[in-house]
Amino acid sequence: MITRRRALSATLATTGVALTGAGLTPLLAAHARTRPAPGTAPAPAAPEKFRRPMPLLPVKQPHSRTGKADVYVMTMRPARARILPGAPTDVLTYDGHFPGPVIKARTNRPVLIRQRNRLTVPTAVHLHGAAVRPDSDGDPMDVIEPGKDRLYHYPNRQPHAPLWFHDHAHHLEAENVYRGLSGCYLLTDPTERALPLPKGRYEVVIALRDARFDEQGQLAYAMGDRGRNTLLANGVPYPYFQVAARKYRLRLLNASNQRRFELRLADGTPLVQIGSDGGLLTAPHTTESIALSAGERADVIVDFSRYPVGSGVVLTNTTGSGPAQDIGEVLRFDVVETAADPSEIPDRLRTLPPLPRPDAEREVVLRMDEGGEHPGAYIDEKVYDPQRVDAHVKFNTSEIWTVTNANARAEHNFHLHLVQFRILERAGRPPGPGESGLKDTIFLAPGETVRLQAVFDTYRGHYLYHCHMFEHGVRGMMATMHIR
C-alpha cells in the first residue's frame, strides 16, 4: 500500500512544490480507503440517539516515576472502534483508544512521553496550549517517521489549564486527527486544587467532534467536508450519560476538524462557565450557551439537583452546517440517583496578573479563497512555508496582535503556539466574561477583528501561529514566528 509520505515525495518530485497547499490535492488523493467528494459519501442508517452510554476517557498511567519527572510510553497505532452498530470502524489511536486517553499532570512536575509511531504515516505530537521547548512542540516538519520513537519533554512550568494533544504533521494533521489522533492533558496546580469544585467522579472530560461515515461504517474523509453529519461525545454518537442530582464539572473540548458548537441545555436552564483554554476565569460566569470553535475548551458547572431523579436533559447544539436532526442534539444527561454535594462555586476563582505595557504591536490577516475546487488559504496573503520566518518577536517582551478574518463568508479561528494570551477587544468591544481569562485559540466570524496580548518570556525559537480549523491550516493558513 502506498503511504502518504511516499505520495508526498512523488508529488514533490513531479511538481517541484514546497510543503505548502500547492501539493495538497495529489497528496490526499493518494492514500484513501474512503475519500468521497463533500456531500457524496453513501450514508449508513443514522444511529439511534441516547441508546448507548457515554464512556469516560481512560486516564493514562505513568510508565514510571522518578524524583524529577513522570515518564509515559504511548503508542500510536491503528485500531478498530465500536462507533456505529454493526462492523467496527478503522481508526488511528494513541494506545488503542478512540478518542485518546487523558494525562493528568501537575504544575512544576515535568512529564516525559516517549511517543512510538506504529502507523504507516509520519506524525508530530503537539501539546496544544503548552509552553515547551521548540523540539517538543510538535512542529509540522519535525515528524516521527513510521516505526520510530520520539521523546517529548513537557516541563509544566505554567499554571493549571485543560490542554490537549493532537497530530500536527503538515498536510497529514487534518486526516490524522479526524481518524482519531487526539487526547486530553489536564494540568493542575495548588490554586485549582484548593477550590471546592466538583472532583473525582463528578469531574468529567467530554471530547466533542463530528464525523461522516460511509455505508460500511468507516470514517469518510474529504477535505473541507461541511456535511459531516454525526456528532460524537467521547467517541460515541449521541450517547446518554447517567448523573446524580448534584453539581458536575464538565471539561469540554471541541476536537472537530472545523465544526463550531454552540452548546445549551434543551430546557434553557443556565450553565456556569468557570474556565476556558488557559484555565479558570477570575470569576464564574452564568450563561445560557457555550460557544466552542475547533480546538477551544470550556470548563462548565451543571447543577443537576434542579432535576428530579428519573428525568433527563439534552445538551443541544444550535449552530453549524447539517440537518437539525443530526447536529442539533449532542447527548442526554439522565438523572438516576441522589448524592451528597459538598462542592461549591466560589465567587472568586483565581487572580490574573495585570497586563504589562506592550513593547510592540503587529497585524495578522487570515483569508481563504471563497470558491473554486481547491481554495487556497493564507496568512498575510502568504501560504505556509516552513523555511520562512513571518514574525520576529523579541524574547521577554509583550505584544499586541490585531487579527482579522478578511473573508466575507468563511469562519476562521486563531491559535498561537507557546503562549496563553488575553483578549483585549472583539469587534471593537471588550471581551465577554467567557473570554476574559487566558486563551490560546479564538474564534473569528467573517469580517471580524480581535486584539489580543501575549507575553513571550518562556522559550526562544521557532513556533507556529495558524488557523486551528485543521483543513485551513493544511491548505496553507499557517505561519512561523521566531522568538529571539
Image: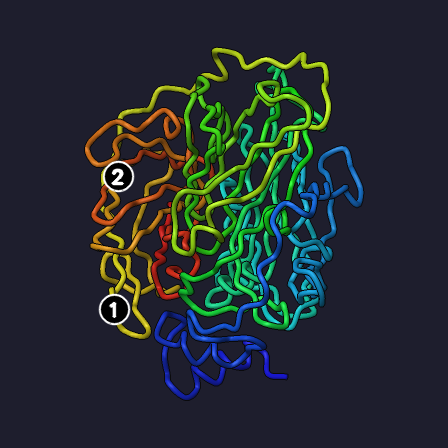
- The residue that label 1 is drawn on is 371
Residue 181 vs residue 268, the one in the foreground = 268
Q: Percent x, y for residue 285?
A: 43, 21
Residue 203 vs residue 348, the one in the foreground = 203
Sequence-first tag of 2 and 1: 1
Task: Point out the residue furthest to the right here.
Answer: 64
The image quarter in which residue 332 lies:
top right
Q: How far apart are the alpha carbons under marks 2 and 1? A: 25 Å
**What residue is at 34 percent from the left and 59 percent from the top?**
477
Please tell me the numbered disc located at residue 234. none
Horizontal side of residue 134 vs 78, given as left or right? left
Residue 282 vs residue 397, the one in the foreground = 282
Quarter of the picture holding the C terminus: top left
**What residue is at 24 percent from the left and 64 percent from the top?**
370
Is residue 462 in view from this perspective?
no
- The residue that label 2 is drawn on is 450
10 Å neighbourhood of mark 2: few (<14), some, or many (≥20)? many
Horizontal side of residue 180 vs 70, given as left or right? left
Is residue 399 in view from this perspective?
yes
On screen, residue 331 above or below 475: above
Query: Disc 2 or disc 1, which is closer to the eye?
Result: 1
Q: Percent x, y for residue 341?
A: 68, 14
Q: How many labels sit on residues?
A: 2
Amino acid residing under circle 1: Gly
Quarter of the picture holding the N terminus: bottom right
**What residue is at 41 percent from the left and 25 percent from the top?**
287
Amino acid residing under circle 2: Val
Q: Percent x, y for residue 223?
A: 43, 68
SS at circle 2: strand
On screen, residue 453 above or below 363: above
SS at circle 1: loop
